[in-house]
Amino acid sequence: MRGISGGIKMRFTGKKRVLFKAGKLRRSQLITTYGCGAIASLPRESVIIAGTDFWKNTEHCSCYLHEENLQSYLGVKYFVTPPGDVDENGISEDMGVPSFRFPTWMYCPKCRRLAPFKLFNFSVNRHPYCMKCKKPLIPSRFVVACKNGHLDDFPYLWWVHRGQECRGPRAPELEISMSSRKSGLDGIVITCRSCGQWRSMLGSVGGKGLESFTCTRRRPWLNDTDAVPCSEKMYALLRGATNLHFPVNVSALSIPPWSRKIQYELGKRWSLLEPLVNDRTTFETVVKSWRLTETCACTAEDLWQQAKYKRDRGEAAGPRTWQEIMEGEYRAFLQGSEDEEGEFKTKIVPVPSLLQDYIERVVLAVRLREVMALVGFKRIDPEYDIDDPATYNPVGRERKDWLPAVELKGEGIFIKLKEERLVEWEERPAVIARYSIPRFADHYLARKGSGFSPRYVLLHTLAHLLIRQIILDCGYSSASLKERIYCTFTGEEKRLDMAGILIYTAATDSEGSLGGLVREGLPGRLENTFLRMLEGASWCSEDPLCIQSAGQGMDALNLAACHACTLLPETSCEKRNCYLDRAALVGTLENSSIGFFSELLNREDPEQ
């Protein structure tokens, strides 16, 4: 699996330190679903991905990624791709992302014994096994966690004995039984063989059964216990629960000048080349020996000049804000780039005549490069502020000058709406009245990115509906397309009016660059896509309930938007499927003036 999957190494600390291969995951999964602190259910193991303190072999240049704008924003020098079992040539490097076995409580399906895995006496370098019954052990289905990120095994002994000590004649020993007559948690019974007490799991998850159980402050992904006291309540959760791990990801597109091939190749080797920039002779000798002049089709002097520019620009530039990153990408799409060899190539195409009153520019992103970094994670509650590290758990105990990241390549369609028409739409009384909702502006999601505004609702909903229509037209999977919303920032010093959306696909495999998405943006096809999209948005199978809704979705942050008409997989959306309203495009049953495209829809409808 060359460059596609990352090996997961099991690691034990203590008197014995043993490493062995536990399984494989895709590198992109190690940045998102199964990042540091997440539980991964592998075919024969259940493990928790270790923090970056335990990552080894990250000094190899093959692991390095550079994206100058994102580095400046996150305050790191470079990024590291999760190391795999083999290098790019398929040669074993004995690398991999370390992990710890978790949950540590397991049970035997034959003798039904429930205990920490160490009490089953199997060898530490083999998969969990009951030596008595010769059966593979099954990891515990339940764990406990708190909002501060602490995680531990479910306290079965505490639960069975109701917070008291076992009064049996010998050490407590638990067994688990599953009732065939009862479904759900009521059918799972834990019994203490020593004292005879028993208790079902009913009330443990989502109830008040753990109210008196104090946080253990355990951090199994760091193999330690947090020294900071924690007063948060611990919640019982299923091992595979989605709210057990919310990754904190940040991504940025490579844009000129950093998208040029010469800068891209320098970035891959920058840790070795940076110390040589002051020695021109040595620098040119090294790049010639690496055949970088042939790879970049330039001279050694050109490489040296670009290396000086990279070093000086990096030293002079201060920390970038998220607003600067988004505005920089927006300008890059408007200016365009015909760089045949770089990682950012665009093509400006004519706007279809039918859409010229609404759309100012259509840009085909023939080649894109996205770098997605893992900054931290949350548990139970997904709320965080990316600029405040205290609001989420970092990926390691100690702050390093790098973060885990993955490189994605793909293509997309950039659409800019007409600013004059958009301003006129924003000033309509019906639009102002519809979106003057306090909960929209006060929610934590509104504080992320550009902030809440009617303009954002329109752009966001347009992106969702276009993605749904493109999925039907060109056959992409529902989770392979993503959005990037370029909207004028609110609450900041106004510097640039933005009104654009980028619909793109970016992946580590070939689906990111097949050309099907770019083809949908060509004249003649985009017009038909828009008309079919508006026609579909004008009616939902849940209408009239959907179009008349005063609030639905997470925290009632959507208006006329539901699973039947607007929502996307959460990996495709930048706002957790919130701030959506298809009435912003087509209007409501009572008032069509709310719709930005309502005149176009009515003009094309033969019954109007």
Image (tube, rainbow, N blue to C red):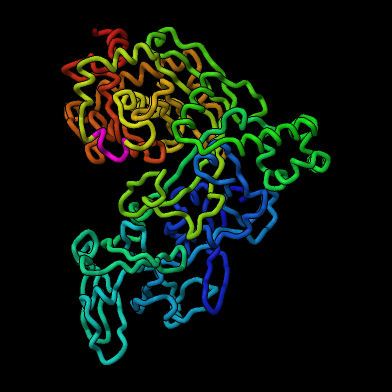
Residue 260, percent across and down?
65, 30
Residue 34, percent across and down?
45, 53
Residue 586, percent across and down?
27, 18
Q: Quadrant of residue 460?
A: top left
Residue 489, percent across and down?
38, 28
Q: Is residue 276 visible?
A: yes
- From this viewpoint, which residue is outermost toward the bottom? 169
Q: Nearer the viewer, residue 386 or 425?
A: 386
Q: Nearer the viewer, residue 144 or 197?
A: 144
Specify the principal SS of the magenta part: helix
Residue 442 is a magenta residue: yes
Residue at point 26%, 20% (across, down): 538
Residue 555 is a magenta residue: no
Q: Nearer the viewer, residue 518 or 326?
A: 326
Please tell me whether residue 84 is drawn above or below residue 446 in the rendered image. below
Please tell me whether residue 368 is drawn above or below residue 555 in the rendered image. above
- Which segment is the magenta one? 440-446
Q: Nearer the viewer, residue 386 or 456?
A: 386
Residue at point 34%, 15% (across, down): 422
Q: Is residue 508 visible?
A: no
Residue at point 60%, 44% (across, down): 65
Please tell me whether residue 355 is drawn above or below residue 327 in the rendered image. above
Residue at point 58%, 49% (across, down): 80
Quick check: 555 left or right of 94? left
Q: Quadrant of residue 485?
A: top left
Quick check: 71 left or right of 62? left
Please tell me whether residue 574 is drawn above or below residue 2 in the rendered image. above
